[in-house]
Image: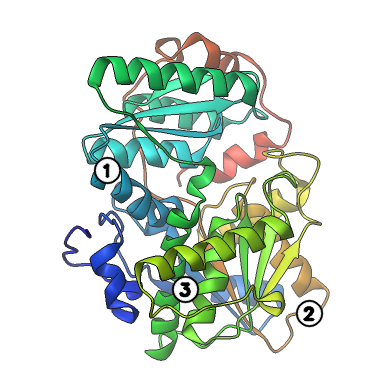
Amino acid sequence: MMTEVKGTARALFEHYPGLAQTLAHTPLADLPAPVARWEGFARDLDVDAVWVKCDDVTGAIYGGNKVRKLEFLLGRAVAAGAGAVITFGAAGSNHALATAIYARALGLDACSMLVPQHNAHTVRRNLLRGYAAGALLRHHANKALVAVDVARQIRQYWKKHGHLPHLIPPGGTSPIGIVGYVNAALELADQIAAGELPQPDRIYVASGTMGTCVGLCLGFQLAGLAIPVHAIRVTRPSFSNDERARRLHTATVKHLRAHDASVPEAAFPDAGFVHRHEFYGEDYALYTEASVAAVRRVRETEGVRLEGTYTGKALAALMADAAQGALHGQKVLFWNTYNSREVEDGGLMYTALPEAVHRYFEEAVQALDVPMAQLLAPR
């Protein structure tokens, strides 16, 4: 059953009241997230209008796109009586950090199963913050070793507590988590109807594990809005590809209809999903000159902090399209999925962390992290 929602808005439940009675859910986010207009940024690009959906402030203790997914993922864990969650990500995973923070807020233990990534100051910060939030950090060289350790952690937890921890997939992307972004699209549709912004001609959003972009596509279908979602691939093709998008879309429709038959059938919106690959760069979590330039441009024009792996690459796509004249006369919306809330690390020294992650504090960061770190510093 849904936890009572106080002082918040969930457009999904307003459009489909039956889901409010059947979907496990716990309110974590401050919704609706506001929309804003980046006037200085638009002038700088010589385009008519650039709007932003400010999911950076979705939560009071931690923002970003993960909070919307965790409302349903952690809601399911709580409903199942789990006392702990295990999730997955790269060493500097924002998802793993968000899961640890909100799991603690709900009284759940959290374990982060991590694999290597290119080094950056944000990796160091997230490791410290996750540990300060109480996460058990487990770092392994590859996914096979992670799988072995997950089995070990499950056995140990069962022997100690008599029940199983709840597993949350990388990025929170599953039909359960995607529902959070179906809600987000319906929320934006309500804001358009209320006159807070015009209907965008296109939306730019980072595509990591695809939960955000697939949820938006499905939500716009349910709202009856034809808004192309430009999903900018920022992860390896195994995580972000067209076939995966179709499978996730189909599974999410099935999941929603299983809980409320009034949710209509919806085929994958080929015209509404534009998968972009040209801004990825050489590897996951490796910044590009274009992503650094995008982060710098919006910091200078709007005072907004983004980062180089997800939002920087998505914004680089918007800027490239503007430079080519593709946005002339169009109303564009950028979906900001990056957390802008300050998170404390408890003043920890890295030596307090598990030895397996010390390398990120002792080895050099990637070359483009020097200008990026300056752009991410508070002013």
Judging by the rendered image, the residue that carries numbered circle 2 is: 326
Judging by the rendered image, the residue that carries numbered circle 1 is: 80
Relative height, residue 46 to residue 143 (above, below): below
Residue at 53%, 69% (x, y): give it.
Answer: 216
Instruction: Classify residue 45 by image quadrant.
Output: bottom right
Local crowd size for mark 2, using a 10 Å CA cut-off: few (<14), some (14–19), many (≥20): few
The count of marks equals 3
Relative height, residue 352 to residue 143 (above, below): above
> Which amino acid type corresponds to the residue marked 3 in the rendered image?
Ala
> Which amino acid type corresponds to the residue marked 1 in the rendered image?
Ala
* Of marks 3 and 2, the one in the foreground: 3
Q: How far across and how far down the image is residue 156, in percent?
A: 35, 15
Tell me whether the residue at label 1 lies in contact with that at label 2, contact meaning CB atoms closer than 8 angstroms: no
Local crowd size for mark 1, using a 10 Å CA cut-off: few (<14), some (14–19), many (≥20): few
Judging by the rendered image, the residue that carries numbered circle 3 is: 185
Is 335 on the left or on the right of 155, as rendered?
Answer: right
What element does badge 3 sit on?
Answer: helix
Q: How far across and how far down the image is residue 281, in percent?
A: 79, 46
Relative height, residue 222 to residue 175 (above, below): below
Residue in the foreground of this view, choosing between 58 and 52: 58
